[in-house]
């Protein structure tokens, strides 16, 4: 990454620094600076992808661009976690390692724990543990991560969210990223570059006359398990607060009693106290 001089005092920040060591100025978070740093390569990929789209598919590409521009960042969680976020006026860690450090969850199975740790480090170095994972979607999110979709406000995420073309695990594997072989450039974007990133990824997959649902499914496909999911991953710096939640979607009926209790209370607080839109169960 090119040196990023502090806009206040000119001291060059390392990629993993967000506070200037020279003057204490708060710079954009490391994940966002890493994404901006690859902007030229992303624009080149977008231009190539756009040029290769057949004439009759141009209107479909326009529809996709409109859809992506209005898409939201979504994070899927279980009912207990949704209840915790919505009913409490406090910040909530969403990153795996931050939750571990806070004693708020137990480690995943060893193989998954190793993978999560390595992938975080290969993409972000020492600040990997501060990154929470989410997805870009025009409707509900990834069922494999939980049945409750929290739709987050773009305004609360613009300064601290970056995007990766696909799930970080798949990306690392597909491109052979290791400690000696850095990630290829042009596959990340700041949130404001989401249309360019989606175009670079998806322009070659367009078909004639897709329905709105088919286009939304191209952007985010929620499969039977995580291996079958396909989506643009969002990386969020720092914890979330319920003020960042714009809407909640629960697309299926909930039968487990404790889940019903959690969702019923979260629904009451969200709709009667916080003005958060609620789609699906239990409304
Ligand atoms: Zn400074």
Image (spheres, helix red, strand yellow):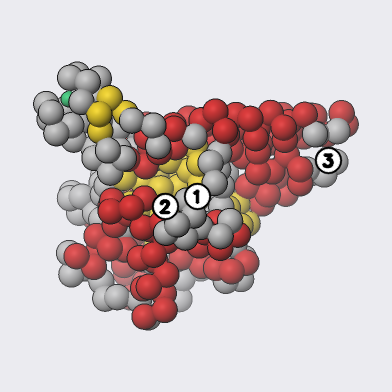
Q: Residue at x 31, y 45 (%)?
A: 237
Bin the neighbour count of mark 1 within 10 Å (Cα to Cα): few under 14, some 14-19, many 20 and up: some
Bin the neighbour count of mark 2 within 10 Å (Cα to Cα): few under 14, some 14-19, many 20 and up: many
Q: Is residue 223 visible?
A: yes
Q: Foreground: 269 or 114?
A: 114
Q: Foreground: 120 or 71?
A: 120
Image quadrant occupied by the C terminus: bottom left
Q: Are marks 3 and 1 in contact (CB under 8 Å)?
A: no
Q: Is 55 positioned to the left or the right of 201 in the image?
A: right
240 up-or-down from 41: above or below: below
x then y, percent, for residue 38: 49, 34
Image depth: mark 3 or mark 2 in front: 2
Image depth: mark 3 or mark 1 in front: 1
What is the secondary structure assignment of the residue under circle 3? Answer: loop
Residue position for label 1: 183
Q: Is 124 positioned to the left or the right of 167 in the image?
A: left
Q: Residue at x 51, y 30 (%)?
A: 39
36 up-or-down from 112: above or below: above
What is the secondary structure assignment of the residue under circle 1? Answer: loop
75 up-or-down from 204: above or below: below
Q: Are marks 2 and 1 in contact (CB under 8 Å)?
A: yes
Residue position for label 3: 209
Q: Residue pushed farthest left?
A: 23
Residue position for label 2: 123
x then y, percent, for residue 138: 57, 44
Task: State the image quarter where residue 101 is shown.
Answer: bottom left
What is the secondary structure assignment of the residue under circle 2? Answer: helix
């Amino acid at each position: 990454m090119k040196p990023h001089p502090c806009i206040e005092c000119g001291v060059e920040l390392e990629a993993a620094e967000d506070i200037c060591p020279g003057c204490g100025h708060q710079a954009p978070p490391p994940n966002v600076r890493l994404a901006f740093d690859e902007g030229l390569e992303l624009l080149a990929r977008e231009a190539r992808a756009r040029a290769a789209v057949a004439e009759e598919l141009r209107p479909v590409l326009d529809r996709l661009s409109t859809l992506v521009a209005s898409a939201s960042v979504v994070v899927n969680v279980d009912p207990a976690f949704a209840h915790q976020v919505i009913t409490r006026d406090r910040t909530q860690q969403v990153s795996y390692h931050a939750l571990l450090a806070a004693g708020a969850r137990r480690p995943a199975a060893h193989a998954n724990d190793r993978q999560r740790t390595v992938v975080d480090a290969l993409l972000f170095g020492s600040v990997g543990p501060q990154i929470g994972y989410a997805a870009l979607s025009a409707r509900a999110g990834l069922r494999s991560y939980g049945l409750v979709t929290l739709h987050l406000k773009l305004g609360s995420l613009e300064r601290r969210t970056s995007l990766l073309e696909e799930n970080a695990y798949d990306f690392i594997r597909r491109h052979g990223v290791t400690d000696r072989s850095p990630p290829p450039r042009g596959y990340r974007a700041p949130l404001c570059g989401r249309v360019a990133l989606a175009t670079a990824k998806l322009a070659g997959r367009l078909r004639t006359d897709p329905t709105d649902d088919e286009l939304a499914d191209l952007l985010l496909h929620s499969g039977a398990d995580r291996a079958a999911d396909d989506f643009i991953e969002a990386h969020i710096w720092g914890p979330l607060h319920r003020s960042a939640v714009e809407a909640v979607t629960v697309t299926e009926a909930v039968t487990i009693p404790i889940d019903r209790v959690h969702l019923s209370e979260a629904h009451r607080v969200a709709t009667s106290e916080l003005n958060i839109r609620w789609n699906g169960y239990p409304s």
